[in-house]
Amino acid sequence: MKIQSFLLMISKKLRNYKFWFVFTPYFWLVLFFFIPLALIFKISISIAEWGMPPYKDLFEFTENGFQINATLNNYIYVLSDFYYFKSYLNSLSLAFTSTLICLLIGFPIAFYVAKSSERVRNIMLIFLIIPFWTSFLLRVYAWKVLLQGNGLINSLLIKFGIIDTPLPLLHNHYAVILGVVYTYLPFMILPLYGYLVKFDLNLIDAAYDLGAKPIKAFFKVILPLSLPGIVAGSMLVFIPVVGEFVIPEMLGGSDRLYFGKMIWEEFFQNRDWPIASALAMSGILFLVIPILIFQKQYEKYNLK
Amino acid sequence: MSSNEDFLIIDNISKRFDDVVALDKVSVKIKRSELFSLLGSSGCGKSTLLRIIAGFEKPDEGRIILDGQDITDLPPYLRPLNIMFQNYALFPHLNVYKNIEFGLKEEKLEQNLIEERINEALTLLELSALQKRKINEISGGQQQRVALARCLVKKPKLLLLDEPLAALDKKLRIQTQFELVNLQFKLGITFIIVTHDQEEAMSLSDRMAVMQQGNILQIGTPVEVYETPGNEYIANFIGTANIFEINYNLENKLFANALNAFIESTKNITTNKFLLRPEKIEISKFSGEENIQINKCIGTVKEIAYLGSYTKYLVKTDKATFYVFQQNKFFTENLNIKWDDKVVCSWNENSIFPIND
Amino acid sequence: MSRNLNFLKISLLSFGFMFLYFPIFTLVFYSFNDSERVMVWTSFSFRWYSELFHNEQILEAFYTSLKVAFLSASVATIIGVMVGYSLARIKYVPFRIFFIFIGTSPLVMPEIILGLSFLLFFITTNNLIGFPSSKGFLTVLISHITFSIAFVGVIIQARLSSFDKNIEEAAQDLGAMPNKVFWKVTAPVILPSIVSAWLLSFTLSLDDLVVASFTNGPGANTLPIVVFSKVRLGLSPEVNALSAIVLLVVMSAALIFYFANKKSNIEK
C-alpha cells in the first residue's frame, strides 16, 4: 500500500512541468559544468607524474595500503613564484584598465541611446548590435591589419609625410588594451542600456529645469541611479578579460605574459596539468568576490 | 438586490507575511446575489482577502465556504469563481475574441455552445465590433469590458473585482458604476468589490465591510455605515465627520465645551463623543440675538468652498472647527454668507449620534 | 546650454560608431585587393572571394560551425528557458543559491578556465567509461551548450521578472492548470525573448574560439579555429574576404529584422 502511494506521488511529480524545469538544468549543469570545475580542483591538488594523465591518481592502493596523493605544493608553487604572480597582475591590470575605458566610452553612449525616442533608439541599437554579431576574431584581426608595421595607419601616416619610419603600433600592451576595449565594448553598453532604459531619463531634464548644474546632477542623480547597470556591465567585461587569451596572442608582444596564456602554456607546452589546474583554480578563487558581487547586483538589476 | 441566504462564508481567516499581520481572524458572511464591497485604505488587507478568496494565497487559519462547498484548499483553477484584476491582465498575444474564449476552452464544452456564450457576452458588453482587435488596440474602458466578458462567460457563482473603477476618469467612472450595478442586477451574480474609494463603495454596494489593518471594523449597508458608524475611524473614513467631546453629562443633559452649547439627543448617549454630520447642520447669519444654546452654536466662517450644488463652510468656535455643508436650494447670484461672518449653526436632536473611539 | 550638450551628444555617438565600424570597413576594403600581400594594393578583384569558396578547409569548418551553432543554440535555449523560469517563478528550488551559481557563473567565467575544465572532464570520462572515445563534434557541442545555457537563463529570467504576473494568475483563475498556463500564456508572451536568446547562443557558438580549441578533435575544426590558425602569425586575404561576407550577412539580417519589426508596427 505504501509503495503504491509513494509511486503515485512520484508519478505526479514527474508529470509536473516544474519538476523537469528544475531537474533538467541541475542534471546538465552539475554533470557538464560543476563536475569539470571540481575536476580542476582535484587535479590541482594532485602530484605531477609522467604519462597520461600526467598526474598521480588521487586515491591509490599500493603495497602500503590506501593512499591519498594530494598535495598543496602546486598552490604553493603557483602563489609564490613571481613569474605567475606577475602574469596574474598583468591580466588584472588589463582587465581593470579596459573596464574603465569601456565604462568611460560606453556609459555616455548607453545613456544617450536610452534617452532617445523609440524610433531613434531602435536604429542605434541595430547599429550597435551589428559589430556584436560580427565575429570577434575578425574584429581583432582587423586591428592587426590596421596597426601592423605596414598596416593601414602606418601606411597613411608615411604617405602623408607625418612620419618616416613605421610606428610599432602592434605587439605591445596598448594594442592589447585597444583590442580588448574594442571587443568588449558591446558587453558594457548593452547591459547598461538595458538597465537605463527602464528609467524615465527625462527626469534628468527636469532636474536641469529646476536649476541643477549638469555636473552636480550627474554625480548626485544619474550615477547612483545607474549603479546596478554599471556594475553589471563592468562585471561582464572585467571577469572574462582576466582570463583573456586570444587578444593578447594576436595583438600583444612577448614583453608581457598574461594569465590566460600562462595556463595555456602550462597545459599544452609543459604538460603540467596540476600546475595549470592550480593556476586556473587560484584564478577562480580570486575572481570569486567579483563573481559574487555580480550575482548580488544581478538580483538588484532584475528587481527594477 | 440580494437574497437572505448566506452564500460566501469567510470564517476566521488569518494571514501573515513574515512579521506583518495582513489579516487577523476576519469573518464575513456575504449573501447570494449581493453586491458587497471591501473598503479600506492601502495595507488594510482587503486585497489579501480577495486573493485568498480567489485562491492565489493560502490562509494561515480559517476557511472559505462558497455555496456550501469548502473551497479553502482548492487551487484557483478549480474554484467556481472568477476575478477581474485592477490592470485587467488581458492576454497580450490573443485578440479580444480569443481572450474571452480562453476560459471556456478549459471547460471542454461543445464548440457551438462556446460560440453562443461568447456572442452573448460580446453583445451584453457591446464588444461585438471589436472582437478581432488586438488588446493594445482598444481603450482602457474597452479593455475592462473584455476582462469582464472573459469572466462572465464562465458563469461564475461569484465575481471578484479589484478596484474596478480606479483606472477610469471621472465621467467614465460614473457611467461604469451604473453599468456594473445594472449588470449585477440583471445577472444575479454575487459581486465582491475591493476599493479604497468610499464614494465608489457607497454608490455600488448593497452592503460593505470597512477594513483597517487586517481587521473588519464594521459591516453594514451604506446607510448604516454612514449614519451609524462603529467608531471614530469609520466615521472619518466615510464622508466628512464632525466629532466632538461630551464634557458634561447629567441625566441626558449634555454639554459640549468645543461648541459652547447644550446638546439634546433622541438617542441614549453612553459614549464620551458624538458625531454630527455636516449636511445635518443649518447655517445662517448671526442676527445678534443671544439665545440659550441648545443644539445651536455660534461661530465664525473661516473657509468657504462653493461646489455648485452645495457649499462647504468651515466654521470656527473658540475651541473647535467643524464643517457645514449647505445645499444651495435656491437660485442665488451671490453667496449670502461670507468669510469672517458670524454665524449661527443649528441641528436637529435626531442628528446627534453617539460614537466610540 | 542644451545646444552644447546636443553637440557633445552627437559627437560622442559619432565617435563611438566610427570607432566600432572603421576597422571592419578596412577589412572589406582590402578584401578586394588582388595582391597576395594584403597591404600592397595592386588592383580590384574578386579573386579572394573565389579562393574562399574553393577552400575546402574553410568550407568544411564553416559547415561544422553551423551545425554546432544550430544544435547548441537549440538545446541551450530549451535548458536555459528552464533555468530562467525556475529562478523567476519557482519559489522552492532545492539549494537555490547553488542553482544560481551553476546557472549564471558560466556567463562570467573566463573562457580559458571553462575550456580547460571541459577538456579535463572529457579525458577523465574517457578513462573511466570509455566515452567519448575521442574528442570531436560531440564534445564541442556539449561544451557550447553548457556555456550558452547561462546566457539564455539570464535573458529569460530578466524577461519574466518584468512580466505582469497577473496574466498568469488570470489564466489559472479561468481554469487553466499550471502546465497549461505555461504553454498557453507564459511561453507565447516571452517568445520574442526566447528567439533573441536563441540568436545570441547561435552567435556565441559560431564565434567561439577558446572553448572549441580545448574540446575539438580531428575532423571537427570550427571556423574560428581555422581562421585563428591563419591569422595568428600574419595577414590573410581569404580572411579579409570572409570578413566582408560575414559583415554583409549580419547587416542584411539586421536590416531584415528591423524592417520586419517596422512592418508589423505599421500594420497595427
Image: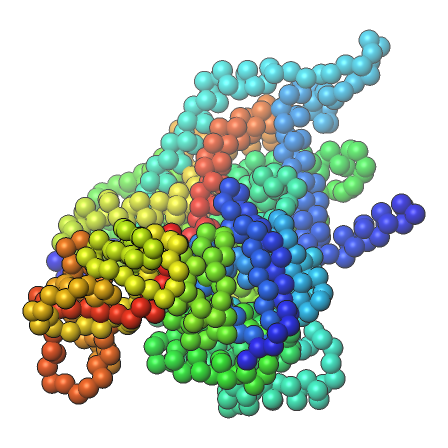
Give the farthest residue toward the front.
B251
What's the residue at 44%, 42% (across, down)?
Answer: A297
Residue A160 position, x and y percent, is 20, 52
Which of these two is toward me, C174 or A261? C174
What is the count of numbered marks?
Answer: 0
In this rendering, position of residue A291 left or right of residue A230? right
Q: Nearer the viewer, residue B270 or A120?
A: B270
- Image location (x, y in percent) of residue B79: 67, 66
Q: Residue at 37% across / 35% down in the picture?
A: A96
Query: Farthest residue toward the top?
Result: A64
Nearer to us in this view, C110 or C41: C110
Q: Is residue C236 at all visible to an observer of this figure?
A: no
Report x, y in % for residue A180: 40, 43
Residue A258 shows up from this direction: yes
Return the x and y of residue B249 as percentages of the image width and height: 31, 52
Which image quarter is the N terminus of chain B in? bottom right
The image shows residue A161, relative to residue A131, as above or below, that is above
The residue under the point 54% across, 77% down is B148
Q: Check the image and tell me how it is coloured.
A: rainbow
Residue at 55% over, 44% down: C104
Q: In this view, does A143 lie above or below B342?
A: above
